[in-house]
Each structure stands twice: as structure tokens, then as C-alpha cells.
Amino acid sequence: MSPKTRLRAGHLDMIYENGFLRQIQIGDTEVLRMIYFAVRDHNWGTLAPIIEQEIIEQGEDHFRISYHCRHQEHAQDCYAWDVAMEGLSNGTITFQIQGTALAAFRSNRVGFCVLHPIHGLAGETVAITQSNGEMVKAVFPPFIAPAQPILDIRAMSWQMNEPREKQSMELNLAFEGDIFETEDHRNWGDASYKTYCTPLEKPFPVVQNPGDKVVQKITFTTEILATAEDSLKTLPSFAEKASGDKPLLAIGIGASYLKKAITASNAVLLKSLNLRHYRIEVQPVLTDWILDFSNEAGNAYELQLPLEIALHLGAEFQVEIESFVQLCQQNRLNIKFLLLFSTQSLVTPVNIIQQIPFLKQALPDVKIGVGTNYNFTELNRNRFNPELADFITFSFHPQEHAFDEMTIMENAETLLYAVESARAIYQLPIQVSPITLRKRFNPYATDPQDWIIDEDQRADPRQVASFTAAWVKKCMAHLEKAGAQSATFFQTFGSQGVLDEDGQLFPVYNALIK
């Protein structure tokens, strides 16, 4: 990975890192978050670029960069690019790519993407030039849009303000080589809007055959419109538009995937965190579910924490619920939250939601939540009536599309938008559970067998680094600002935990102390 390089093109400042342009700013205002290209496989996995022959030439107000790069699938080269970008002293950036398939493989996307920041754009109008040359108006959505808010893009133009210099700016993007459209990237945990190539209405995956080519170009231009202070309007941030009393954020922790008893010494350490609940997974269709349930209830008792139970129900959900309730009553379990999910659906289906009155009668002190065990996008695109439930739940991770530390840190902001959007849709308190560094499932895989991600792939080596502690603090700040009811972070111990099996604390442990 190439180191970060600070670049300037006229009044634009930016970072060049690993072949892409990031955090493009005028003064203190971020006008574009990123310009990059991607090769996505048939399961929407991102193939990392391997950069070669990189040349960087830069002056005080201009730059020129070129390189060759390639992507690999199964350790074999499958795609290659020749890349050239230039920043001019008048504030113009051009970015050109010429790609060639080196082997046959299936892809869902090959080409350019542009990320737009949320702050300063949410709710603002953008002028679109369509493929037929017609001009239309669109809006960057304030709350997270379930479907693409902007389609059929050849060029786009919008305005932003730069408060420090008291300037109003017009920003323009022109695309060549494909038709582009914009989606709300916040659905998948990214703090941006994304304008990308190849409309999703076209069939995918596409087989890339050796010799197939992609040639694209992006031109970004800027113009200062005014400098008078009275020409500027004040754009409130998304958070400033939020209203209502904010509850205190309750923090919980998840059970370790290692399925081991928590030692007395580790229990002492975990109890020092002042946690509010202990999340466990219960799936009555599994053979050993009662034994696993009993063991995790024992861990909760050792931690002196009430349970947060994610109950995953199958086709015989009524029978499974009765068995579950009977076990809870017989053992007088201390349950705080019950999350109702279905193994047959991305969100809690109506027939399971209708079981809530029975569950409330059987477990009267338990708060019952519905929603999704996956990303916010499932909650947003598969809307339902939650009126019998006490709260809405969804999970969160920051690495659906990119895996570098800058992206992960930026994406903590998404929690603010996701919580506010979920509340606007469902009018109920919001819980985020679990929050993890890497994704646990891939519900977007072409082959359903690829939905499951093994535990080694769920673990990120940065779990034990101070970086993750800093990220968690940002996540908690955004959750509190949005007024989330509760959040469940990580696991007790192990590679996805806050300490190892021997009681060695990871830096993230201290970040969770409240």
C-alpha cells in the first residue's frame, strides 16, 4: 500500500493513497470523499489493487500521477489497469482508467465510483445531465434512501458552502465511458453517497473474458460563486435536525464464538466495564441449542448481567417459541432484551411479530425488538409494521466496501444517520446489535452458500490495536448524539473480543469503560 501523499490542485486539497484520491477539500469543507475504481466479484467482494510503476509528480498547486495496477482472484491475475490522473492549478481534476480482463471471471462491477460526503449535502439539490442530454433536478436524501435517489447520470452539478473563507462553490462532475447512478451508501454502513458506473438494472454478474476492456474518465471542476458573507445560507448538519430527548446509551457485549465458560478472573475484568447486557444467539432448530443456551446463561450469571437473546426462529416458529419460553420460565432467566429474527427472512416477518403478545404474557419483564440481524439496508428496503414491538434493532460494521483505516474511521459517522433514519421510519427506540469490526454475513452473495462467513474471516487483526479503541469512541459518540437506546459491541474474549482467553486486555477494553 502506498503512503498518504498530500496534493493540491489550485484551491483543492486532497490525499492520494493506494492509487485513489480522498478527502478532497476546499478550505475546511470536504467536497468529495473519494474518487476510485473497483473490481467487484460475483459476491460483491472487492478485489484489492496491486500497484506497480507508480509515478507521482507534484508542484505547489498541481500534480500528475500514473501507474499500472492489477487485481487477483484466487491468487491469479484477472484484471489490469493503466491509470492517469492530473490536478490543475485552476481546480480541475481528471482521472482516466483503461482496463483489460486478463482471465475469465464473474464480476458485478468494473470501473469508477465517486463518494460524496453527507455533511453539507444532505437535503441539497443536484442538477443532473442524463444520457440523452436532458437536464433534471434531484436531491441528496437527508434520511437514508432505500433505492437509488439519482439515475441515468452523464454529469452532475451542485453547490456547497465553505464557511471559513465565506465562499459559495459550484462543483461539477462529468463521466465518460458508462452511465452512472447514485445510491445511498449509508445503507451498508458507509458515511457517503456513492455515484457508480453501470446501472444496477443491467443483469449481473457479468462474465469478463480475456481481452474485454473498460475505458472511463472522470472530470471534476470547481467554481467559486461568491465571497460575500450574506450570500451564504447556513446548512444544519444531519444531527442538528434531530429532535427529541436523548436516552442514555446502554452498552452490552456479545458472547464469544469460542463457546467456553468465562473464567472467574476474566469475569472480574468484564464486570469492571459496567456493561448492561450480554448478547447470546439462540437457534432452537439446532440439535445442541439447549446445551449452548444453558452454558451461555451460566456465563451471564457469572458476569451478573441480564441477557440479550437473539432468537433465530425457523419454519416451525410457534413450536420453537413454546420450547424457548418453557426453558426461560423453568430456569427463571434474567432477560432484558429479546430480539426476534427468522432464518427464513432478512427482517422479522409479520407471522413472528404476531407472536409478541404471547411472549409478553409469558415473559412480562422482557423488552422485545424486531428488525434485522444484517445491515440497515435490509431494514430500509423490507419495511414492516412493528407496532407490537418495543424497539427496532439492526447490526453494523464499517467494512462492506473498503477495509482501510481511513474508511473505517469515517464510517463511524454512519451510525448517526442510521439511528435517526430507523427512528424516522419506525417511530420506536433504536438498538444497534451487534457492532463488529468486520461483517458476519454476506446476504448479497450470488450463491446463498456464500452468505456464511467463517470465524477466521470475521476476525480483524486490528481488533487488538489502539486504532479500534479510537473507532469505538467515535461510534459511541455518534450513537449518543443520535439517541440510540442501546448498543452491543464485539465479544467477551477471543479474536473478536475485548480481551484474550488469558485475560490480556485489548485497547478496546478501555474504550468501553463508561
Image (cartoon, helix red, strand yellow):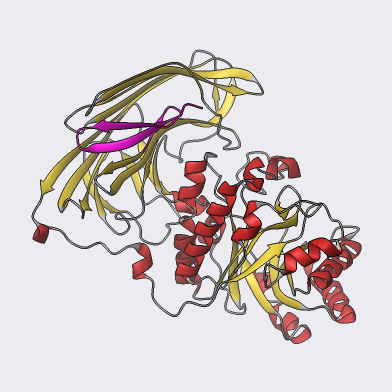
Q: Is residue 487 above or below residue 4?
A: below
Does the magenta portion include 258?
Answer: no
User: Which image quarter holds the C terminus?
Assistant: bottom right
Q: Residue at x 73, y 86 (%)?
A: 364
Is any atom of residue 5 visible in this view?
yes
Give how far across and how far down residue 382 sits, in percent: 55, 60
State left or right for residue 129 relative to residue 232: right
Q: Residue at x 83, y 66 (%)?
A: 299
Front-lying residue, 162 or 37: 162
- In the rendered image, which quarter is residue 96 located in? top left
Q: Residue at x 47, y 26 (%)?
A: 2
Give how far across and how far down residue 73 sits, in percent: 62, 24
Give how far across and how far down residue 398 sits, in percent: 54, 49
Is any atom of residue 310 visible in this view?
no
Front-lying residue, 5 or 364: 5
State left or right for residue 377 relative to residue 513: left
